[in-house]
Image (cartoon, coloured by chain):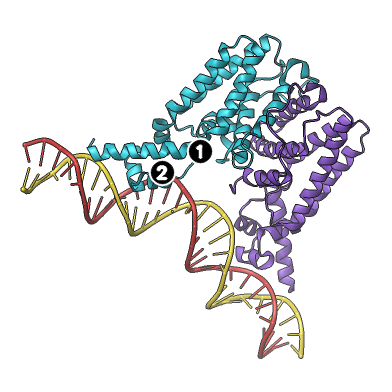
Chain colours: A purple, B cyan, C yellow, D red
Amino acid sequence: MRADARRNAEKLRAAAAELFQERGLDVPLKEIARRAGVSHGTLYNLFGSREALIDEVVTDLAADRLDEVAREALSLDDAWEAFAYYVEKLCELQATDPAVADVVSGRYPGAERLMSVCGQSMDAAERLVEQARAAGVLRPDFTSADLVLTFGAHALLARALADTAPDAWRRGVAFLLDGLRAESAQQPLPADALTQQQVQDVMGSLAGKG
Amino acid sequence: MRADARRNAEKLRAAAAELFQERGLDVPLKEIARRAGVSHGTLYNLFGSREALIDEVVTDLAADRLDEVAREALSLDDAWEAFAYYVEKLCELQATDPAVADVVSGRYPGAERLMSVCGQSMDAAERLVEQARAAGVLRPDFTSADLVLTFGAHALLARALADTAPDAWRRGVAFLLDGLRAESAQQPLPADALTQQQVQDVMGSLAGKG
DNA sequence: TCGTAAGTTGACCCTAGGGTAAAGATACTG
DNA sequence: CAGTATCTTTACCCTAGGGTCAACTTACGA
């Protein structure tokens, strides 16, 4: 690879990182190229597709953040605290970083490494749900599929709130958590839980691409 | 107005009603014209804008449905039942009719009559929230602004779920309601409630047009 | 029945985005 | 320092949507 190409790739990575974090993973590629100061043709030459660019620029960063939250949550002794910490922190991550929100929402199934990060994060969620349910502090009818859907809806709401009341999402999370304690459950739920495949389908259509 | 024009307007109203209910208020105007069997130029001639068409086709229908839900809710004796009934029924309306969902979400501020219907619906929500709070069954820190945001997020989720698990939204509503009972409230909320203006801004950017 | 006002059409323009490839520029190598 | 392989640019194509208007067609009244 020629030196100028390497330099351009670096400029593009930097611009992409900025814009993905500011505006989410669906920012126009031409705008990334513009910010990097190269033509969009160069972007296509060097990366080929949005997915490839995402994988290079976002994946490791998102993985770090998600892993850290999961690790910290799992390190807490109290099962309810662990679960609540995970939910709150993950929502906070989504609210402050649109790129991470898009990762959690599992769009861009073309970005392989990214999807595996997304999968790992879901595994952590599953573990925390199981743990809290087993401890009898989380209502037994709540599944990790419910949690994923919650995250998906939260991501959209948090992004809409960002300019107006960047912390208001915390209210919704508080209401939800209070409804998820074992002692809050009132009646059998009026619908069945979703399978993982169903969750994936739904998350796909949740933010565009319907 | 000439007879053929009146006929075309009628065909367009019928097609619009169908498509709005199937796919929401942002369905392409050219597609409405196509289904009506006229050219899109005619649609612009006869209605001028999407907002005008919406006002003629959707407003009364949505008003009827929303009023009915509010009326039935307000007729219930138990304040919690009334509140819960309203939330559930309104969410059901959103899940089964994308047009109503868009009305509740308050997009299309250009459609005047529609916005007044939206406003009336919000007033009913406010009344039910007050009533339930006054009766001590609803947690006192929950405001009608929270309810409107909830509806907005719900509308998006329900639409994404429609093809996969059309009833799954009921789980989320159940979790929420269980968290909204007065006895579920655990701690002071971590953020302030939104003003009406803030809610309007947020709802505007919640579904596109950000 | 025929002139004309009223209505309709479809080709056209615009934006915003994704994507491609021929032609031009430039870094490296012998 | 010249030649070539590599890279970049730019002009272009595509889709999907909103919107306009000159030219055609048609309903209807005198």
Crowding around mark 1 (Cα neighbors within 10 Å: few <14, some 14 to 19, many 20+) is some
Chain on which label 1 sits:
B
Q: Which quadrant of the figure has residue B159?
A: top right
Is B74 situated left or right of C7 in this image?
A: right
Number of numbered discs visible in the structure rendering:
2
**Numbered mark located on residue B32 in the image:** 2
- The three-letter amino acid code for the residue at tag 2 is Ile
Q: Against B194, is B140 above or below? A: above
Front-lying residue, C14 or A136 = A136
At which x and y percent is residue C10? 32, 56
Q: Residue at x 39, y 45 (%)?
A: B35
Q: Against A172, is B49 above or below? A: below
Is A174 situated left or right of A48 in this image?
A: right
Q: Secondary structure at mark 2?
A: helix
At which x and y percent is residue A69? 84, 41
Q: Residue at x 50, y 20 (%)?
A: B67
Q: Against A161, is A202 above or below? A: below
Q: Which residue carries the number 1 mark?
A: B24
Q: Which quadrant of the figure has residue A133?
A: top right
Chain on which label 2 sits:
B
Q: Against A84, is B28 above or below? A: below
Distance from label 2 to label 1 (Cα)? 12 Å
Q: Secondary structure at mark 1?
A: loop
